[in-house]
Structure formats: structure tokens, C-alpha cells
Image (cartoon, grey):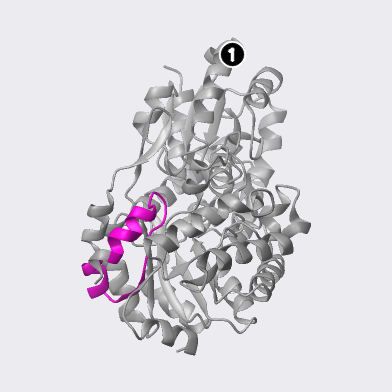
Amino acid sequence: MPDLKKLYDSVVSGDAKATQAITKEALDAGVDPLTLVNEHMVPAMDEVGRRFEANEYFVPELLISARAMKASLELIRPLLIARGDKPVGRVAIGTVKGDLHDIGKNLVASLLEGGGFEVIDLGVNVPPERFIETVNEKQANIIAMSALLTTTMPSMKTTIDALKQAGVRDKVKVLIGGAPITQKYAEEIGADGYSENAVGAVALAKKVVAPA
Amino acid sequence: MHPLIQELVSRGPVITDGAWGTELQARGLGVGDFPDIWNLTHADRVGEVASAYVAAGSQVILTNTFGANRIRLSEQSAADRAGEINARGVEISLKAAAGKARVFASLGPTGKLLANGDVTEGELRAAFGEQARALAQAGAYALLVETMSDLEEARIAVGAARETGLPVVACMVFDSGKDKDRTMMGITPEQAAKALTEAGADVIGANCGQGIAGFITICQRLHAATDRPIWMKPNAGLPIMVAGRARYTTTPTDFAGYIPALIKAGASFLGGCCGTRPDFIAAIRHSSR
């Protein structure tokens, strides 16, 4: 039986190889896969988030920790699917129409995966119809939109309006983020949430899908 | 110091220019349109922006080539026009400068993250090398590596730009951390100044990311960490949305009020980034005298 404290440490330090090796050992020893996720790796990502908020960690550290967690989830996810467990949520993520910036969006996507979400990455310059399609065909229950430019952020409102027109607005939670976005703007356009950074986005996504 | 930079800064602070994107939008560039392609399709309107800055008193103007690297152009299916777009960008600015301003040609980030495996070092080197050569051949006075969030990408771009033999300015965006004094990747002004000096940049600085008030300490810290002249291009504050359009709240007078402090903090090149317009340049010129 491996020392599971090491699983926590390897995620916090971003050691993907060690994370995967300890995961494998633990699974072979019969540890429940969800225990590994909920009791060791999720707290580790919370610690990574705390360090980010405290300016001890920056984007590179976030990325390597998320990658370590992802390496472990590659082993765990098939087991969860086989026994019928559902992911925390299914997120359709993209940079809005007219905007080609993908660094922020990619970072949020990596951290959401690290947080146990299934992520459908629609890429950049995503028109409203693509988001609607993904809700209808892939049953995404969260739409996450990014915009870097003040000139493209109105596409977020256009997308929300299109979701309403297509009659699917109630099926999804809409989260938005990006340099020019504010909480006030999120409220104005009727989004369900806004996060200032990628770490907050994961917490927000968990909050909006939690049973009331 | 590079003799061409020495010549410029020996007579006191140099006034650069303001934002281009918003000026092009005021002349009809649509939301989501790629500004650099206008060098081929709307050269007259790009020239108007350059001329407006020269008329306002810019001693250095940039070029409309910020996104004209192969990696970003490929998203517009225009990668093969990189050479042409960069050359035209320099020609347009040179014509507008008409000998009254120097043309510093702009190279912006690729929008891909090395740390996330989105792009390789080799791809970055090739893209910046191609762009730098095109800008140099077209007659730029200097090359400007700007708006960089990742020090590694900035170093690769500086390396590629230096191969032309032209002076190279390198500036980064400090907008992260609780004091907004780090790059997105967590680099401090001291670390950036040291690494960019070692990479061979002739001028080092900061642009974009936040309003001018936050630039004073960043300027002091960069200046204390390098012997190179300092380049400063702050935003006109943070935008607020009014009726679906971005409005910047800092006025030219507010902005210019900080210029003496910025000069005292060691800045040699002064201009503005997002939200600044030709009237900001006129105000800077007035207050730097």
C-alpha cells in the first residue's frame, strides 16, 4: 500500500510521473479510485490554488500541477466510466466569435480537467451555434466562454441570447472570463458566473453544478 | 549602448506613440478583423494613424505589424503573406514619418504558450526570425518586441531580432499578482530586466496590462536592475463597458500628469498603449518639456 500523502505532494509539486506511479500502485492495492481523487488530489489542487492566490505559484506551476493530476485521471477515469460514475460536469469551453486568443481558455480547460470535469474544447472564434450544438448533442451542462478583447466581449451576450432563442438556456450554466470581463458585466448579460482567474473558474464550475 | 539608441536618448526623453488598434477601429476596422492585413487592403487608413501620431509630436512611431508573425497569420490563412505584410507595414510608417520620426517595427506575441506545449522553441525562432528580417529589409530603424507575457518567448524573439543588427527594444506586460508587478508567468521586473539584458536587448521596458499609476514602481525597478534605457507604454487605465463598447477613463491630462514621475523613475521612452490616442501624445509632449 503506497503512502497516499505522496500523491498529494506529487500533485502540488507537479510531478506527473510520480503522480501516475502512485495512482497505479494504489489502484493495484485496491484503493477506491474516487478516494484518490476526492481525498488526495482535489485537496492538492486546492492547495495549488491557495498558493496561486498567495502569489507563491504562477501560471507555469498551475499548468504542471494540472498536468500531474491529468496523468493520474487517465488511469482513474476509465474505471469510473466502467462502473457508471459520472464526471463532476461536462464543460463546453471556447473563445468567443471574433476572438482568436487561446492561452487563458487553454489554462482554464486544463485546470477544469484537473478538477474532474469532462472538457469539450471548441477552440477559438466559436460562433453561438457551436455552443448550442454541443449542449444538444453532447449534453454539456456548463458553457465556459473566454474573450481577451473589449471588442469581442459583446459576443458573450450574443451567445447567451442565442442559447435563449434555441430554448436551451435552462439546460446549462454559463461562465465567463477574460482580461476585460468583470462581475458587473456577467450580471448585465445574464451569465451564471464570472471568475477573475483560472483557479477561481474551477471553484465556480463546481459551485454551479452542485445540487442546490 | 547601441549607437542608434545612444543618438536618440542623448537629447532627453523620447516621445513614442499611442494605441493603433482602436485608431484603426475608428477608421472602420471591424470587430474580429485582423489589423495587420489592412497593410495590404487599407494602407491609406493605416497611414492616417501613423500620420496622426507624427502630427501629435511622436519622435518614434511603431508599425501595424504587431500580429504579423507566421503563427498568428496562419489563423487568418495568411501565413505566406508574412513577408509582404511586414514590409508594407514599415513602408507605411516610413512614409508617414517623412523623416520627422523614427520607425520602430512592432513584433508581438504569438498567442501560444511554450509551457503548455502549444508551440515549440524552433517554431517561435523561425516565426520571429522571418518577421524580423522582413521588417529590417524594409528599412525599420529599430525592432520592438512588445506585450510579452512569457520571458522565454521574449528571449527567443529578442535573439531573432538581434540577428538583423538593428537596435532591439524588449518589453513585457506586468499585470499579475496582488501588486500587479509580475508577468502572467510570475516574473518580476528585476528578473525580466536581467534576462532581457543578458539576451542582448538594447532597451528594456513595460507596456499594456494596467494604467500609468502602476508603471512608476515598475519603471524604478527595471531601471535599478539594468543599465539599458527604459521604455514605458502604459494603458489609459482599465476599460469600462458603455453600451457594449470599451471606454477608457483616463484623460490625456490625467495621463500626462504622471509623466514627470515616470521620467524621474528612469524612463527614456514615453508613450501609451491601449486607450491612448494622438491627444495623449500631444499632452505627454507638453508635460515632458
Judging depth in this view, the residue of B227 and B274 nearest the camera is: B274
Q: Position of residue B229 (x, y in %)?
A: 38, 80
Judging depth in this view, the residue of A29 and A156 nearest the camera is: A156
Q: Residue at x 54, y 32 (%)?
A: A144
Judging depth in this view, the residue of B213 and B100 nearest the camera is: B100
Q: Is residue B43 shown above or below A142? A: below
- Please say whether residue B204 is one of the residues in the magenta stretch: no
Judging depth in this view, the residue of B91 and B190 nearest the camera is: B91
Q: Residue at x 45, y 56 (%)?
A: B52
* Quadrant housing the N terminus of chain B: bottom left
* Quadrant housing the C terminus of chain B: bottom left
Q: How many marks?
A: 1
- Please say whether residue B275 is one of the residues in the magenta stretch: yes
Query: Which chain is indicated by disc 1?
Result: A
Q: Is residue A132 shown above or below B216? A: above
The three-letter code of the residue at mark 1 reads Val
What span is in magenta? B259-285
Q: Position of residue B162 (x, y in %)?
A: 60, 81
Q: Which residue is mark 1?
A: A168
Q: Position of residue B10 (x, y in %)?
A: 35, 86
Q: Quadrant of residue A122?
A: top right
Q: Residue at x 40, y 41 (%)?
A: A196
Q: Residue at x 29, y 43 (%)?
A: B249
Q: Is residue B199 left or right of residue A134?
A: left
The residue most toward the right is B80
Q: Position of residue B67 (x, y in %)?
A: 61, 56
**Can the viewer see residue B173?**
no
Helix, strand or loop at label 1? It is loop
Q: Is residue B6 shown above or below A207? A: below
